Structures are given as C-alpha cells and as structure tokens.
Image (cartoon, rainbow, N blue to C red):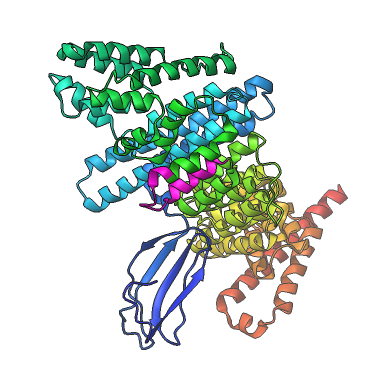
Amino acid sequence: VVPGADSSSRQLCFAWGPAEVLVCETLFGRAGASRSRAGAAAPALTDAVAGTEDGAPSSSRVFVVRRDQDIYIQTLRKLFNESHGIFMGLQRSEEELAGKSRKAQLVQVSKNYRSVIRACMEDMHQAAVSTRDPALQGQYSTQVSILSAMELIWNLCEILFIEAATGDLSAAGPLLLRLLDWVRLHVCDVDSMVREVLSSESPSKHKLFWNVVDVFVLQGRMDEARHLLSKEASANPTSMNMYRILDDLMKKMPVPSLSNTQTLTELELKWQHWHEECQRYLQDGTFASNPHMESICKILLGDEDAILEKKELMTTWYHFLVTRLLYSHPTVKPMELRFYAQSSMDLFLGGESSPEPLDMILMAAFEFEMHQVIKECSIVLSNWWFVAHLTDLLDHCKLLQSHNLYFGSNMREFLLLEYASGLFSHHSLWQLGVDYFDHCPQYGRVYLELHIERIPLSTEQKALKVLRICEQRQMHEQVRSVCKIMAMKALRNNRLGSALSWSIRAKDAAFATLISDRFLKDYCERGCFSDLDLIDNLGPSMLLSDRLTFLGKYREFHRLYGEQRFAEAARLLLTLMTAHIAPCSFWMTLLTDALPLLEQKEVIFSAEQTYELMRCLEDLTAGNPDKKKFQDDDIETTKVEMLRLALARNLARVIVKEGTVEGS
C-alpha cells in the first residue's frame, strides 16, 4: 500500500475524516493519525516528517488519500459548475412542462450535459498541448481519455434510454440513424487520414485513398465516398464503367428516414430489391478487375468477412456493430440490439483480447441493462459526477422508479449524496453540493447538516455564506454552531464587538454574558468603551442576558450624562444598582460614576435616592468577602470616604431644599 514500507518493522496507521484519509507508516506500537471517509478515492501523496518518541525525526511519511481527487483538477471546474446549472434547471422544470414539451426537454438536457463534457474535453486537450511538463501532459491526456469515454457512454445512453423513453425511437429507422451519428462523432481516429488524403494534389493516387473511401462506406457516408470515387474515375477512364455501376448502387441504397414517411414494409422491400441487385453484379464479376471496388460491393452486401478485413479502419467492435447493422439489418429494433452487439464483439475481438471495462459498459447499454451501466461506471470512473447526473436524468425519464436500494434510499438519491459529499471537501465547490442535497428528499437534509458543520470557517465572508444557507433552511442548530465558532474566534483575537455580534446572533446567553463581562473589564481598565456603534444599537437584543442588558443600559447612562440629562442619568444609574443586574464587582464603579452627579450645583438625587445610594455603599463595604484587603487598599478607602462625604453633603442639601419647598 505504501511505497517502500518495511512490513517487518513498521505498521500502517490511519483514521477517517470527512473528505480524506491520512495514512502514515510508523514503528510498531506507535499510534497514527488521520482523517477521511471511505469512498472511491484517488491517492494524492504528500511527504511529511514524522517524529519519534524521543523527539528525533524519523523517515516516516504521511500519505493523503483524497475521497474524490478530480474535484481538485482546475480544468474540470467548468464540468462541475456548468452541469450544476443544468441539473437545477431540470429539477425546477419538472412540474412546469408536460407531454411532448417535457419529452423534448429531457433530450435537450441530455445534449446540454454532453456539450459540457465535450467543452471540458477540448479545454483539457488544449492544456495538454500547451504544457511543457511531461507529468502534467500525461495527467491531461488521461483526463481527455476519461472525458471522451464519458461522452461516448452518455451519448449511447441518450439514444437507447432517453430517446426511447420519449418515444423518438419507436420506429426502426431512427435507431440506426442515431447509431450512425454516434459512431461518426466518436470514432474519429480516421479524421487525420481523411484530411491528409483530401489535402494532397492528387487524392486518387494517394496511398491511403482507398482506406478513406472504405472509411466513408463503413460509416455510411455515401455522398463523401461517391465524391472520392469520382476522382478515381476521372484519373482512370478504364474503370469508368465499374465506377458508374458502383456509384449507382451507392446512390440507390435505401436509407431509413427520420420523418417516417415510409413504412417498415416498404423499406424492407426496397432493401431486398437493392440487395439482390448488388448480389447480381458481384456474381457477374463486374468488379473482379478492381479488388477495391469488389471489396466495397461485398461490404454493401453485409459480408461479415469483408467488413472484418477493415478491422484496423473501424478500430472498435461497436463501429463494426453499427456497420454490420447498416448493411445487414437496417430495420433492427431496439430490443434486438443485444444479440447483434454480443456477436459483433465476439467476432471483432476474435478471442485475441479480453473486453475492456468500457466494452462491458457499452455492452450493458446495448442489452438495456441501465442499472448495470450505472454500476460499472461507478466502479470504473474516477468520480461520481457521471453516474449522479445520468441517474438523475434517467429517473426524470421514469426509468428507475422500480429500483430501490436495501437501506431505503433509491439509486438516484444515493449517487447524488455521494457526489455532493465529494463536493463538500473542496474549499469552494461545497456551495454546489448544497443544492444537490436539497434535491435528495429522504437523506439530503441529514447529510447537509452533517457536512455543513465540517466546513472550515476560514473567513467571516465564508461564515456568512454558511449562515445564510442554514437560515434559509431553518437549520437552527447549525446556525447556533456557526455563530458560536465565529464568536469564539473573534474573542480569541480580542475583537469584542464581532464576538458580541455573533453571540447575539447565536442567541447564546452564557457567551453573551462572558463577552459583556469582557467589555466591562476593558472599560474599567481603559475608561472608555470600544465598539460604541454596536452597543448603542443593541435594541431588544440586550434582553438576551442580564449582563448584556446591564452593558446596554450602562452605556445609555454614559450617553445621557454626555448629553447633560443628569436627572434621567441619575434615575438610570440608581435602577442599575437596585435591580441587582450589575455584577457586584462593578458596584464601586457605579457609585464612583454617581460622584459627579452628587457634586452638581443643582441637586440631582432626592433624599430617598440618596438613602438608596448610601445603602448600596454600605452593602458593598460590609458584604465584601475581602473586607480586610478592601480596607487595606488606600485607593478604595479613599473612594469610599469621598462617596460618604459626597452623599452626606447631598443629603444635607436635599433636606434643606425639600424643607424650604414644604415651608413655602
């Protein structure tokens, strides 16, 4: 498992996490650490120095095995982002369209997915051509091969499953025409050869001329084949008669029509008559003097041996299958494909080689085993993107309704959950994963709750995104969790205003109390408040906890005092003390704040209010558990004496004032 690991003296240690697993090679008896969850994973190795028990470095390395390596490939970002938009559009329009418009839309959605795959494939090919790094070039080339296989499979599934489900292939003709288009689009190894011949000065004398003609015939491209043969006839007048006969046969070849203007019986009758004509010319030896034209005539007759002689030009068994159907069974019906597909693969491979995984997937498609197609693709392909989106589309075509998995969720939901879980391991693609979870009715919310709690809240902007997602879905527990995490981060960085804001948003009374205490402590040390805008605009939020209420009201006292509204400030200060919401440690500060009001020229505190202040001062000095220490503190003793003097003087002034008022 680990390159170069010594199994006799070392062991493998690992542990799972949300998106990857860390595997480390250590000495026996040593513990290992790591993180990830199981799944189809591509390994990405990173070296790290591991320490021994005595602190000295050892030669151990740490290997990171990612759950879904493809999401970290920059050039595949287009695939994930653009397909997300197609997926969402399909979910939204499910109930908006019906009947023929819905069927047409499903086919269009499939084509849109394929166009995204092809665009990514072209970008990847361009990247492979432009890079000078051999390792990167190999990686890009591998991805091009994978994307090409994905488009090939998807296109075949579109023809056999999606168009069949929408009724577009109810007749035999359209099926063969779609398969011909499929082969022409994906079997493009001969394109360079065609360009080379056509760009030469004398195409008919080019060494690959007849190969190009054969390719056109094998792919049913009759007009192009006839055009090339006309060049041969012009260059060799002796073959003019043979050319005209072969050209006439190719021109008269019955071709199925997409418009369904002819019945199946009419097509078969025309085909039989044309086939007999080809047979007659071959038996008469019309083309005997030209082996190339004779070979083409045999292909037109569907001679399997003649077609197999062109194996190198066809390159794949499924090209052979479509050519064989074109010239032997043009009216093939969808459910008959499985028999021809299996025999074509056996004939083409001829026991010389074993079928590749791609061959088995295509064979399963020709056999209309769509569940097997999905299963094989899940095993072979390097990510869940393909199977998740294809299964979702097939489900919308009502083709997977009867297939439920043993644990309750259907196949569509299972694959979407796996794909979305992989997206959540990426620092930005996780936002796409949210929408996929939203459209998994059975387990989507549970998965979203579990994954969203594991998102690293590296910035406040990212935290706000997560918070908005949770609030939109009434995920109250996750909202509180995010707010608490951000509040704790802000508190550690001594950003009290931000910490208080997050704790209020989390509705966490205990944490709001803790931060309020920090604000009050800072005030005592610095003599002023920080984050005044936040404290001044707490509003109803200050009712979250008594301490927060006190902080807000105490700040209001300072504001009233600054505006010289002394009577209101005095009443509020007294209320804060008598309501017992102020911490005992802050009482001396409150009483000290009363000193300037007691020394005002105008009497602010009434006799009753003055008595309340005196009682509070006595409660503070008499009830202090550190009374001896309190008495030994010269500063505190001085404050107490000044307060007593100020209270006594204020009481005397009040009595005189109130007595004068009563006497008058």
Q: Which quadrant of the view contains residue 222?
A: top left
- Is 284 above or below relative to 373? above
Residue drawn 55% across the image and 56% down it: 486
The picture places residue 210, in percent across and down from the top left corner, at 23, 26
58 or 346: nearer the eye?
346
Q: Residue furthest right?
A: 663
Residue found 36% across the figure and 81% down from its top: 51
> Is 298 placed above or below 128 here?
above
The quarter of the picture where the N terminus appears is: bottom left
Q: Does residue 360 show up magenta in the picture?
A: yes
Query: Can residue 448 be spotted in the picture?
Result: yes
Identify which residue, 660 or 2, lies in the foreground: 2
Is residue 424 among the parts visible in the rendering?
no
Where residue 226 appears, as percent x and y from the top left, is 30, 15
Q: As drawn, which residue projects farthest toward the left?
A: 201
Asked if residue 660 lies left or right of residue 423, the reply is right
Is the magenta region chiefly helix, strand or loop? helix
Magenta-tinted stretch: 347-367
Q: Nearer the viewer, residue 128 or 194?
A: 194
* Image location (x, y in percent) of residue 304: 40, 34
Which residue is located at x 62 percent, y 34 percent? 91
Does the magenta portion include 345?
no
